[in-house]
Image (cartoon, rainbow, N blue to C red):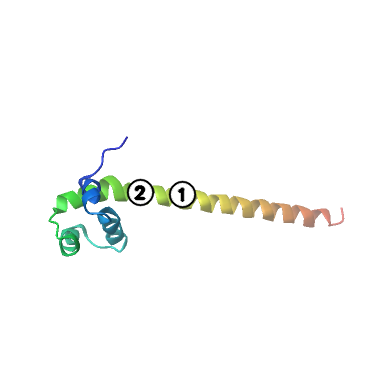
Amino acid sequence: MRRLTKIEKLDHVYPGLADQVREWFAQGVAVRQVPKLVFAKYNLRITEALVASFRSRRWAHEQELMLEKRIDALIARLNTREDEFALALAQQLRGLPN
C-alpha cells in the first residue's frame, strides 16, 4: 500500500483539498502559488515543499498513467482502423480481374 502524502492526509480534515490542488496543477498554477491559494480557500498554511512533494509523488505519476492510457486507447483505435482498411482493401482487390 502506498504512503499518503501530507496533502492527502490533510484532505481527511479538509475534504476536497487534494482534488483542489490537482485542479490547480491541471490549470497550470505554479507550486509556489498553491500555498497562497490553499490559505485563501481553507485558511490552512502549508509549505511549498509540501506542495512540491505532492506534485512529484502523486500528481505527476497520475498524469503519466493517464497519458499511457490515452496512448493505449489511440493505438487500439489505430489498429482497428488499420484492420478495417486492410479488410476493405482485400475486398476491393478480390473484385479486380486476375
Residue 46 placed where, x, y %?
14, 53
Label 2 is placed on what type of residue? Glu
As drawn, the label of residue 88 is none
Residue located at (70% from left, 52% from top): 86
Position of the N terminus, as image quadrant, is top left
Residue located at (28% from left, 59% from top): 20
Quarter of the view holding residue 88: bottom right
Earlier residue among tags 2 and 1? 2
Which residue is more in the foreground, 5 or 83? 5
Mark pair 2, 1: CA separation: 11 Å
Which residue is more in the foreground, 83 or 56? 56
- Estimate how packed mark 1 is, as few (under 14), some (14 to 19) or many (20 or more) residues with alpha carbons within 10 Å: few
Residue 32 placed where, x, y %?
17, 59
Residue located at (42% from left, 52% from top): 67
Locate residue 76 relative to residue 39 in the image: left or right: right
Q: On screen, 1 above or below 9? A: above
Q: On screen, 2 above or below 13? A: above
Residue at which label 2 appears: 62
Which residue is more in the foreground, 35 or 12? 12
Residue 18 placed where, x, y %?
27, 53
- Estimate how packed mark 2 is, as few (under 14), some (14 to 19) or many (20 or more) residues with alpha carbons within 10 Å: some
Quarter of the view holding residue 42: bottom left
Locate residue 72 relative to residue 86 in the image: left or right: left
Label 1 is placed on what type of residue? Lys
Q: Is mark 1 on a helix, strand or loop?
A: helix
Residue at which label 1 appears: 69
Q: On screen, 60 above or below 41? A: above
